[in-house]
Image: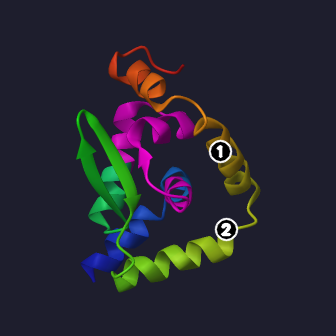
Amino acid sequence: MLEVLNITKALSDENRVRALMMLAGGELCVCQIIEMLGLAPSTVSKHMSILRQAGLVETRKESRWIYYRLADRNVPKACEILNWLQKHLKNDKKILDDAKQLRKMQKMSKDELCECYRSGKGKI
């Protein structure tokens, strides 16, 4: 039961659902998620921690950067939940707007974007 409760908790916040939908397009650096959600780095870190605890996302560290991706598709509950979200939110205006903004942001230099957060300057 704890696993189901962790998943439902993770899905109970709009920003966490938005992050999951962004990750459906592939792995993102935490700086990219911060930029997209427009939240403080510590807030995004907490959201991503909740998603990770629920088994919906995985992380990897490369140098100083943390990257997030959707959980391995071999995890049945995570796969079912992620497929359900994608099915029901594929035409949601906010999700479509996020996808459009994410495509624009991904054309930017990730080093420049991430450096502004690492240096404490905030948004670019």
The image quadrant of residue 70 is: bottom left
Amino acid type, callout 1: Arg
Residue at 39% from the left image edge and 21% from the top image edge: 115
- Residue 1 at x, y = what percent? 28, 83
- Residue 60 at x, y = what percent? 26, 51
Residue at 65% from the left image edge and 45% from the top image edge: 103
3 lies above or below 39:
below
- Residue 45 at x, y = what percent? 34, 42
Cα separation between marks 1 and 2: 18 Å
Q: Which residues are magenta?
A: 19-47
Residue at 38% from the left image edge and 71% from the top image edge: 7
Q: Residues within 10 Å of mark 1 (few under 14, many from 20)?
A: few
**Colouring rule applied to residues:** rainbow
Q: Earlier in the sequence, mark 1 or mark 2?
A: 2
The image quadrant of residue 40 is: top left
Residue 103: which numbered mark, if any?
1
Amino acid type, callout 2: Leu
Residue 89: which numbered mark, if any?
2
Image quadrant occupied by the C terminus: top right
Tag 1 secondary structure: helix
Position of residue 99 in the picture relative to residue 81 (left or right): right
Position of residue 116 in the picture relative to residue 59 (left or right): right
Does the segment drawn in magenta span residue 60? no
